[in-house]
Amino acid sequence: MRIRFTVNGKPRSYFGSGMKRLLDVLREDLALPGTKEGCGEGECGACTVLLDGQAVVSCLIPIAQVAGRRVATVESLGRPDRLAPLQEAFLAEGAAQCGICTPGMLMTASAYLRRGGRADEGAIRRELAGNLCRCTGYQHIVSAVQKASRQTAGRARRRA
Amino acid sequence: MRGDAEAASVLRPRTPAEAVRLFQKHKDALPIAGGTDLMVAWNAGGLAGRTFLDVSPLRAWSGIRQAKDVLVLGSLATHTDLLRHPLVRHHLPLLAEACATVGGVQIQNRGTIGGNVANASPAGDTFPPLAVYEATVAVVSAGGRREIPFLEFFTGPKRTCLAPGELVESIRVPIPRQPMARAMFRKVGTRAAQAISKTVAAGLLWLKRDGTVEELRLALGSMAPTVRRLRSAEAFVQGRRLTPAVVREAVALVSNDVAPIDDVRSTAEYRLAVSRNLLFRFLSEPR
């Protein structure tokens, strides 16, 4: 089947089985390998992307269900020479170690920040509960999201 | 190995009428809504060769609305939709709490209430709240529409009374009468998120002016092949005061209505002991 959708703001078209996972379409058909596969059963959050702005695990979504919808992957956040504030905060706080969980952490956190999520540690930990990291012990990740949240709030105040 | 994607076909109806027509024609098709359970099985190779009926485009089934004294939860309402909805938070706080404990945000954003119910896991976290709220499940097929009392919907682990060609349209929940004395939702798992419950409990309590029990409703999940109401304990406290002796007796009766097992997540002994403790606290402590 032919499926049309948007990835990182660009219209995309896929032709093939509707049961292919969004994760595989992103990596294999659209050459966007930033999204990582962790467990492949919706437990670890490594493959998190945004679907119409909501954090979802791309290993549990058949591409047929993406028709007409907007997908955002980690590639939409920033580039090596122009990182997003959230990515800068991850670097500054040492929030990445092996890196496999990082794209998923970034996408879940970016959905939280776009909703106006605050620098509240408990709220951030609840939001990131579906993203597992086996290296950092989470504290650096939570600190990075807090930092990015304060910066976002600061920018919003300056604009207002 | 996951199922062979090339060999799979996906039916995508646009309206409920088209969905039931397609399902009548393709009775072996497997309905998929949020896919949070089905896709795990697909990825593991368990559903190879199946045809899928994707109900996710059916906008008509995604809303949450009030119809007189009933909240109608469209089967495609997600856990996130439910836990954020003002009507659900106000009238059915135990359901909102339960939705917030299912998986993590990624699962809450995709998993639907209809899919959760139709999937019939013995550990479904929304089931004890829906059991004490005395919900009904509205199902449709090409042949018509029927409503099934919540407890009768489940016939065993992962088994329901859905007939071939029937789809869950909505979950209908009567708004509980107020004032209510106490309400409780408690899930016990290995961690707060992403854990499948060892036991999950819900309770509603109404007291008369003289302090005696007008009505008690208790339900436990993960404690039997399907969600159970604790009819023995409920009946025992009816009309009595919740003195320490009455509470102890009621809690002892829990084992009449459940049949916990040892499995990878817990033991029968632990499940029963913890469930009794949860109910003991609920009945003993005014909140």
Image (cartoon, helix red, strand yellow):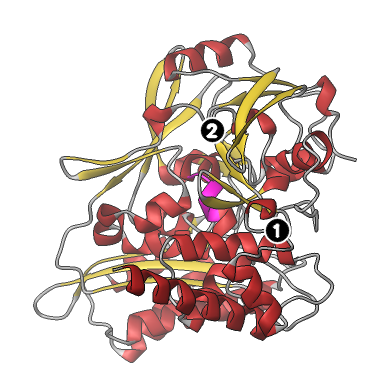
Rendered position, B2 above or below B28? below
State the image coordinates of residue A58 (x, y, percent, origin top left): 69, 46
Circle 2 SS class = loop
Q: Which residue is mark 2?
A: B161
Mark yes or no: residue B229 visible.
no
Image quarter (top left, top right, bottom left or bottom right) of the N terminus of chain B: top right
Q: Residue at x 77, y 53 (%)?
A: A34
Q: Residue at x 56, y 75 (%)?
A: A145
Mark yes or no: residue A126 visible.
yes
**Which residue type does callout 2 highlight?**
Cys
Circle 1 SS class = loop
Position of B29 with respect to B152 (left or right) is right
The circle drawn on residue B262 is: none
State the image coordinates of residue B87 (x, y, percent, origin top left): 25, 53
Estimate the spatial distance between the alpha carbons at disc 1 and disc 2, rounded to whole Å: 53 Å
Q: Residue at x 67, y 75 (%)?
A: A90
**Which residue type does callout 1 highlight?**
Arg
Task: Tell me the mark number nearer the camera, choosing from 1 and 2.
Answer: 1
- Whether discs 1 and 2 lie on one chain: the answer is no
Look at the image and give the residue range highlighted in magenta.
B108-112
Residue situated in front as seen by the camera: A76 or A67: A76
Which residue reaches farthest front?
A81
Which residue reaches farthest left?
B209
The circle drawn on residue A79 is: 1
